[in-house]
Image: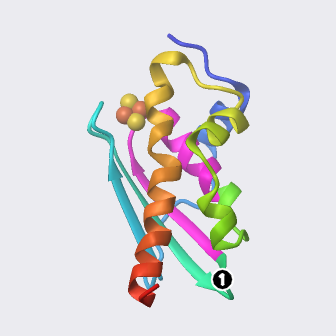
């Protein structure tokens, strides 16, 4: 089995911000074309900042760790800052991912960005 970093294992065992925001301001859903796994992000926006970020991930351990790390990195950030978070940043923050699991990190930031765009669309921006 490919070796996961301690950080990945830690986020996988104790994922932060799991769940759904009922009255979310924006929702982003993305499926991974490689494996068919799914990730959904929910955001709550206040004063142009991400007041709350939650996610639901139907995927492998790496995808769960990635979602958890994205939610943690995005919470409290301005929309612009959150839009600048990349999948690469997240993989780096997790101490790297095994090569055959890198595709799993391709969902996280994209799903977050999609939720922010959903919010901006709804606002008519
Ligand atoms: Fe599907 Fe990791 S195997 S996201």
Q: Relative to the observer, which residue lies in front, 57 or 113?
A: 113
Quarter of image, ligand 1 = top left
- Closest to the observer: 47 or 57? 47
State the residue at coordinates (62%, 21%).
4
**125 horizontally vs 84: left or right:** left
| Disc 1 residue crowd, few under 14, some 14–19, many 20+, Cα 10 Å | few
Seen from this angle, which residue lies furthest front? 125
Which quarter of the picture shows residue 37? top left
Is the CB of the residue bearing disc 1 within 8 angstroms of ligand 1? Answer: no
Q: Can residue 31 be seen in this view?
A: yes
Horizontal and vertical percent for residue 63?
48, 39
Is 103 located above or below residue 83 in the figure? above
Question: Is-magenta flag for residue 119?
Answer: no
The residue depicted at 68 percent of the width and 57 percent of the height is 72
Q: Which of 121 and 107 is in front in this view?
A: 121
Q: Identify the magenta region.
A: 51-71
The residue tagged 1 is 48
Helix, strand or loop under label 1: loop
Total numbered labels placed on residues in the image: 1
The answer to whether residue 15 shows anywhere in this view is no
Q: Is residue 23 above or below residue 5?
A: below
Residue at left 59%, top 61%? 83
In the depicted structure, whether residue 16 falls above or below residue 58: below
Image coords of residue 69 (percent x, y): 64, 48
- Residue 54 colored in magenta in the image: yes
Q: Which colour scheme is used?
A: rainbow
Q: Where is residue 109 in the image (x, y as percent from the top left)?
A: 53, 51
Residue drawn at x 40%, y 80% as measured from the top left: 121
Position of residue 121 relative to residue 88, above or below, is below
Is 78 situated left or right of 100 in this image? right
Q: Is residue 77 left or right of residue 115?
A: right
Q: Find residue 84 and report its image quarter.
A: bottom right
């Amino acid at each position: 089995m490919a070796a996961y970093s301690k950080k990945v294992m830690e986020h996988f065992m104790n994922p932060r911000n799991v769940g759904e925001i009922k009255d979310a301001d924006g929702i982003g859903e993305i499926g991974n074309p490689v494996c068919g796994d799914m990730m959904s992000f929910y955001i709550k926006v206040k004063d142009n900042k991400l007041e709350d970020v939650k996610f639901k991930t139907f995927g492998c351990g790496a995808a769960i760790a990635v979602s958890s790390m994205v939610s943690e990195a995005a919470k409290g950030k301005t929309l612009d800052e959150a839009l600048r978070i990349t999948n690469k940043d997240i993989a780096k923050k997790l101490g790297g991912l095994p090569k055959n699991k890198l595709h799993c990190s391709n969902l996280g930031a994209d799903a977050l960005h999609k939720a922010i765009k959903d919010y901006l669309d709804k606002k008519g921006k």
